Amino acid sequence: MVKKLFSSQRLAVLATQGRGQPYGNIVAFAATADLKHLLFATTRSTRKYANLSGEPRVAMVVDNRSNQESDFREGIAVTATGVVRELEGLEREERLKIYLAKHPYLEEFVASPSCALLQLEVETYYVVSQFQNVVEIQIDRNQR
């Protein structure tokens, strides 16, 4: 269910915090095949990047809502929690292939020297369906 949702959606909402205040952003994301990592990009001059530099713990929400009444029956939302870090070197190059496979139109953006490719190292997924059915999935940290 999670893999199918992630394949069908291009955008997520990233929740960060800075100076004790929460902050939400829409980001283009991609997932690794094992779903242990979620990737996104931002320029280093953004508030989200500043927030992540001070507090790397985040939540990212991906959902399938269509803003229709059917969302109450068929809506699925997945919240991923964990720690974000900036990717560099060979690791960045490898993860960038995954990111650009999903978002080829962002190639120029991520090639900019001011752009950071970031990775959410997922610790927990919360899968919510029909607004009340919640399943918690812990990611095994020993096999990252």
Image: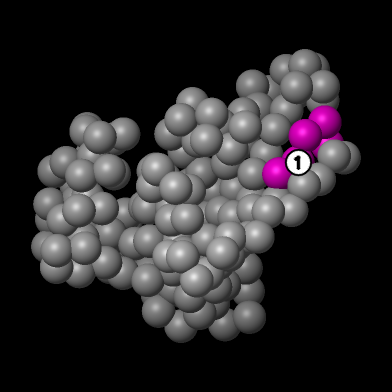
Q: Which residue is mark 1?
A: 128
List the single residue furthest toward the front: 143
Describe residue 61's horizontal placement relative to residue 120 as left or right: right
Q: Who is closer to the viewer here, 35 or 99?
A: 35
Residue under the image location 26 percent in, 66 percent down: 87
Residue under the image location 82 percent in, 22 percent down: 73
- Give SS at disc 1: strand
Q: Quadrant of the N terminus?
A: top right
Picture quadrant where residue 52 is located? bottom left
Verify whether residue 111 appears in magenta: no
Q: Quadrant of the C terminus?
A: bottom left
List the single residue furthest toward the right: 132
Q: What kind of secondary structure does the magenta stretch mostly adopt? A: strand
The boundaries of the magenta stretch are 127-131
Picture quadrant where residue 60 is located? bottom right
Describe residue 66's horizontal placement relative to residue 90 as left or right: right
Residue under the image location 21 percent in, 63 percent down: 91
